[in-house]
Image: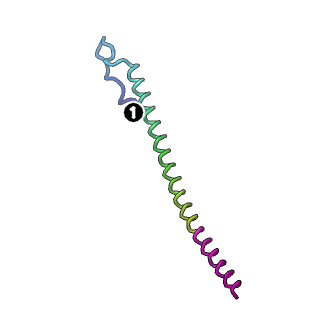
């Protein structure tokens, strides 16, 4: 990649057409943008993974609550039946 950013070879006696410092700054800026992009993608992936895990846990919790409610209702009916008898 660095080779592609090198300025064209200068003609005899003339300096480079673009100062070398500009190429260094451009390369550093591109590297910083690339690092930020990688970090953003990783954060986005982590967020999606956590959201998926949260959905799974929520569904499990709802199912457990339904089971517990069914058991409570069954016990209440049994208790009422025992009291009535």
Magenta stretch contains residue 70: yes
Residue range corresponding to the magenta coloring: 64-85
**SS at circle 1:** loop
Task: Give x and y (percent) for residue 3.
Answer: 38, 29
Q: Residue at x 40, y 30 (%)?
A: 2
Farthest residue to the left: give it: 11
Considering only vertical position in the picture, is 55 above or below 31? below
Q: Residue at x 53, y 52 (%)?
A: 50
Q: Residues within 10 Å of mark 1 (few under 14, many from 20)?
A: few
Task: Give x and y (percent) for residue 60.
Answer: 57, 65
- Depth check, front residue: 80 or 73: 80
Task: Give x and y (percent) for residue 21.
Answer: 41, 19
Identify residue for label 1: 1
Considering only vertical position in the picture, is 48 above or below 59? above
Considering only vertical position in the picture, is 7 above or below 45? above
Magenta stretch contains residue 17: no
- Depth check, front residue: 7 or 79: 79
Q: Is residue 37 left or right of residue 81?
A: left
Q: Residue at x 31, y 23 (%)?
A: 8
């Amino acid at each position: 990649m660095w080779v592609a950013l090198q300025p064209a070879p200068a003609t005899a006696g003339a300096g480079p057409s673009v100062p070398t410092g500009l190429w260094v700054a451009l390369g550093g800026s591109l590297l910083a943008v690339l690092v930020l992009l990688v970090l953003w993608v990783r954060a986005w992936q982590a967020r999606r993974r956590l959201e998926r895990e949260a959905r799974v846990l929520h569904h499990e919790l709802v199912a457990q609550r339904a089971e517990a409610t069914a058991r409570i209702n069954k016990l209440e009916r049994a208790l009422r039946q025992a009291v009535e008898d």
